Image (cartoon, grey):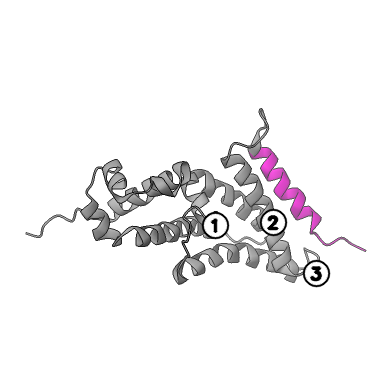
Amino acid sequence: MPRPKTHDDALRVRLLDRAGELLSAEGPGALSLRRLAGDVDTSTTAVYSLFGGKPALVQELFNEAFRRFGARLAAVPTTDDPIEDVIQIGLAYRESALADPHLYSIMFSKVVPGFEPGEESTVNAADTFGALLEAVRRTIREERYVAEPAEQIALAAWGLVHGLVSLELNGNLPDGLEIAPMYERALRAQADGWQRRAP
């Protein structure tokens, strides 16, 4: 009878989530393999077995963050209304950030000094922007948006959602503001600004 597998994917995910929490809440000095293992009730041997060491752990954390983020954006269905698709991708961006706030700073901040993402991470990161870029390209092809470079329009939309989500996650919004409806309204206002008008 085979021995039970204790260093499984569930443990890998728990370790990555806890590593993200430590980094985002306390900074890189808080991420020691001994502390991480203790927090997840496992051994440092398990951490080494799954990741091979701290640099590989950080790399896999970056990969995992973009995998989850990309999966949520990719789950937005393509419809016959590309403008609505752009808006729904923006809403999915915020939903992903709220679902995994401990991973958001890993993706978009230099939380680990000296860390340079590997090729897989670079591809995963580019793919997340690609979903939005393709939706914007459809709006232009269908003459729904003005004939401007799709990359510029997509970057403007990305910047809007990134800024609002960053403010929300960092607790920098005005007291009493109900962010969800304002967030969607901002997405729709920006989308409206890029629409082609009849002469």
What amino acid type should be assigned to the residue bearing mark 2? Answer: Ala
Ranked by sequence position, the earlier of labels 3 and 1 is 1
Crowd rating for badge 1 (residues with CA inside 10 Å; few <14, some 14–19, many 20+): many
Q: Is residue 84 visible?
A: no
Name the side, left or right, on which 55 lies relative to 6: right
- Highlighted range, magenta: 180-199
Camera-nearest residue between 173 and 37: 37
Alpha carbons under labels 3 and 1: distance apart = 25 Å
What amino acid type should be assigned to the residue bearing mark 1? Answer: Leu
Alpha carbons under labels 2 and 1: distance apart = 14 Å
In this view, the residue farthest toward the top is 176
Give me the disc on residue 73: 1
Position of residue 101 measured from the top left corner of the image (x, y, whole percent): 50, 45
Q: Residue under circle 2?
A: 157
Q: Is residue 59 visible?
A: yes
Q: Residue under circle 3?
A: 147
Mark 2 against mark 1, which lies toward the viewer?
Answer: 2
What amino acid type should be assigned to the residue bearing mark 3? Answer: Ala
Quadrant where the C terminus sits is bottom right
Q: Is 28 contained in the magenta span?
A: no
Alpha carbons under labels 2 and 3: distance apart = 16 Å
Q: Main secondary structure of the magenta part?
A: helix
